[in-house]
Amino acid sequence: MGSRVGAAHEVLEIDSGEKRLNELGYKQELRREMSIFKTLAITFSSMAVFTGTPLYGPSLRYAGPASMIWGWVVVTFFTWFVGIAMAEICASFPTTGSLYFWAAHLAGPRWGPFASWCCAWLETIGLISGIGAQAYSGSQALQMIILLSTGTNKGGGYFAPRSVFLAMYMGLTLIWAFLNTFSLQVVAFLDIISIWWQIIGGLVVIIMLPLVAQTTQPTSYVFTHFETSPESTGISSRPYAVILSVLLSNYCLYGYDAAAHLTEETKAADRTGPIAILSSIGIISVFGWAYNLALTFSIRDPAYLYDENNETGGALVPAQIIYDAFYGRFQNSTGAVIFLCIIWGSFFFCGLSVTASAARVVYALSRDNGIPFSPIWRRLHPKHKVPRNAVWLCAAISMILGLPILKLDVIFTAIISISTIGWVGGYAVPIFARLVMAEKNFKPGPFYLGRARRPISLVAFLWICYTCSAFLLPTLYPITWSTFNYAPVALGLLLTLVMLWWFLDARKWFKGPVRNIDLQNGNSS
């Protein structure tokens, strides 16, 4: 008898996130078993302490260390506005489709379908190319590990050619897809390893690197030195150089919406989602800034970092800084290889999390019939309840994105530009809809801004517009085939096709998120 009462009590005690999901018209299909710590781990991994490693060298070269270091502080300040605006919306709409679901409901019945269509496709483009960005970063770190383990660029070490680099890129993408076909608990477990890997590894690199380096730069160099490099970048305009220098921070400080993608699998998601978003921004902004400071203080000779004949072939500036520090003190590269393995691990875990997020966005969009062949992509694994087909679709597209590695030098610039504009641009749609909607139509969650929501949403929206614009700019002059940032062309083509599809066909049938539960009688449709 007592066990029956207990069972009945458990049925009555529905999870607050699941209750809100049902109110919004969705039945619980994914397994709701993630704790706040596991959600934070995946969100933290999607941002990653060392994400900016490949961009550090170009950022330092554009305008010197002061612009890069203080730029991080400025970007962090504005990122809080975006994060706070999104946390409020997440508390009210804890659904796996997150951004595009938010856009549909906040924009109202008239504009909702179009808003959710734009948001969904921006987010899908951003996340899938985000897998490519992490695969490229991981491959570059692995390239440096192999080079320094087999000698150096000067000592006959093995510098992976383009074909091998592409094979590493493909290999990482396939591993992430394979791991994401298991229960989300597998990814969550690996991401708990990830959060400790990044915190402990981050602290080790941040604290040890300046201590190991025998020659360090003075405080005045790190915080006040401003210097453009028109002879190598072709950019003599100071404001332009500063904007490009700050791209490092713009690129690193997003990805916190990963918490929102996992809300249907998280306990009490209407509370834990906002906490995970804001906690991730706080942790990454502090750790990322400290990492940039550690690298900049540890520079031995700024001019030597970019020399194609140096030990790392001028391919990855942080790798050269770390090598110089360890070789200068210990006359070997063992410590540098260990540090680069820590950094590589960060990229590995980040790519794993981004793959999980991308697959869930594709699953949510296909659940609402927003992608060609939707029935295939929304199919869940019968045992693990994960969108396995969506995982492999994301992996296949990101591998195709990497093919130009064989011919182009600026592939990484293009991939991160597409990723950032799509991913961050997706944030803009629900935030703008929240800015202009009537307050009486908004049902607040546990995290509510009240009267502060309009100024916060306005600053957040304008900052996103600036960020997307900055990533469309050419990064090197004169513009040639080898220096051309093809992101505007690729994005323009993709978005034109998406908009044509909308006006010619999709607007007739795409109504945004499709309710799959009937609230009148409680029957699932």
Image (cartoon, rainbow, N blue to C red):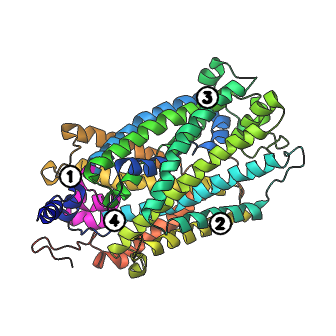
- Tag 1: Cα neighbours inside 10 Å, few (<14), some, or many (≥20)? some
Label located before the other in sequence (2 or 4): 4
> Whole-percent x and y of residue 203?
57, 33
Q: Is residue 292 left or right of residue 106?
A: right
Q: Secondary structure at mark 3?
A: helix
Label located before the other in sequence (3 or 2): 2
Q: Amino acid at mark 1?
A: Met
Q: Amino acid at mark 2?
A: Met
> Whole-percent x and y of residue 10?
18, 60
Of tags 4 and 1, the one toward the viewer is 4
Q: CA distance from mark 3 to mark 2?
A: 33 Å
Of tags 3 and 2, the one toward the viewer is 3
**Start and end of the magenta stretch?**
91-115
Q: Is residue 480 above or below residue 463?
A: below
Please report the residue visible at 48 percent of the width from the left and 43 percent of the height from the top: 253
Q: CA distance from mark 1 to mark 3?
A: 47 Å
In this rendered view, identify the residue nearer to me: 205 or 395: 205
The residue that disc 4 covers is 31
Q: Amino acid at mark 4?
A: Arg
Of tags 2 and 4, the one toward the viewer is 4
The residue that disc 1 covers is 437
* Cβ atoms under marks 4 and 1 closer than 8 Å: no
* Cβ atoms under marks 2 and 4 closer than 8 Å: no
The residue that disc 3 covers is 207
